[in-house]
Image: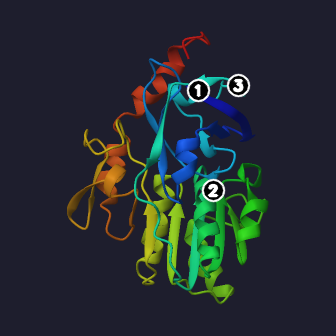
Amino acid sequence: MYSIVERRMIVPNMHEFIVRAPVVAESVKPGNFIMLRPDPTGERIPLSVADWDREAGTVTSIFMQVGGTTAKLARLKPGDTIPTYVGPLGKETVIDKFGTVLCVGGCYGIGSIYPIARALKEAGNRVVVLLEARSSFLLYWEDKLARVANDLFVITRDGTKGRKGHIDKIPELMGAAGIVPDRVIVNGCTFQMMRVSEVTKPLGWKTIVNMNPIMIDGTGMCGVCRLSVGGKTKFACVDGPDFDGHEIDWAEFLARRKGYSPEEVDPLRHSSCRSRF
C-alpha cells in the first residue's frame, strides 16, 4: 500500500496529490506518468508527474476532479493509503540544449510542465513559460515556475491576469517580446494542445505535446491509448506520451477521447453522495 503524504485542493476542482513511493521517486524523469487505483476495486487511471523528492521518496501529481475515480482521490487524506501506484511509465521528455524553449501549461498541465521547464533550464536553455487559464483564480504554481523560467507570461480568457484572450494569442505575445522559440512544449487539456499545434505549425515552431488518451494498463498491452501520428498508429503509453503536435490526427483523437465521457460522469450523477464514491 502507498501512503498519501498530502492531498489538497489548490484551485477549484484541481488537487495537489503527493504519494510516498520511493521506488518511483528514485527513477522518475520529466514527462513520465504513473498509473494508480484509489481502492482495491477501483479503475486504473494515469496521472502525469509534476514533481518529486528522491530523498523523501515522494512523487507529486496534479489532478482534476472529473469522474468517479478522481472523486475518490479527492476525498483521500494524509495517512490514507492506495493499493496501486505504478511507474515511472512512458518515455521521458527529451531534454537537450535547444536554445529558447516555450513551455505552455494549462489546467493540470501547469503542474506537469514544471519539471520539464526545470530540466530545460538546468540544461542551459532560455526557458519561456506561458500559463493559460479561464481566469486568474484557476492559476497555481506561478512562483515555482517563475523560479525556473527566464520569462513568464500569463493569458486569461477574462483578462483578470496577464494578457486577455486565448491560446491563439501566442504568436502576438511572443512577437511583442521579441521571442522566437526553437521548440514549444505543451502540457494541458486536449483542446489546448491541439490549438497550440495549429497555431505554431504555419510558423515552423516544432511543437511537442504530452498526450493523455484513455488508458487501461499503461504498458502497451491493451491498445486503448492508440492514436495516429504521421499516418502511423502509436500507443501513447509506450511510444509517448510526448509526440510531435503537428503530426497528430487531432479529429480522430478527439473522437476517441470523448467516447467514454458519459460513463465517466455517470457515477457522480447516481451516487446520491453515498460512500460508494
Which residue is found at the position 69% from the left and 45% from the top?
56
Q: Residues within 10 Å of mark 1 (few under 14, many from 20)?
A: some
Q: Amino acid at mark 1?
A: Ala
Q: Is residue 132 above or below residue 153?
A: above
Give the x, y percent position of residue 57: 64, 44
Residue under numbered circle 2: 110
Q: Amino acid at mark 2?
A: Ile
Question: In terms of sequence position, does the residue under pointer 1 or pointer 3 come before the other?
Answer: 1
136 relative to 100 in the view: left or right: right
Residue under numbered circle 1: 71
21 relative to 224 in the view: left or right: right
Q: Depth check: give the residue in front, 263 or 217.
A: 217
Quarter residue 177 falls in: bottom right
SS for tag 2? helix
Cα distance in 3D space between marks 3 and 2: 26 Å
Q: Residues within 10 Å of mark 3 (few under 14, many from 20)?
A: few
Q: Amino acid at mark 3?
A: Gly
Residue under numbered circle 3: 79
Which residue is found at the position 56% from the left and 50% from the top?
26
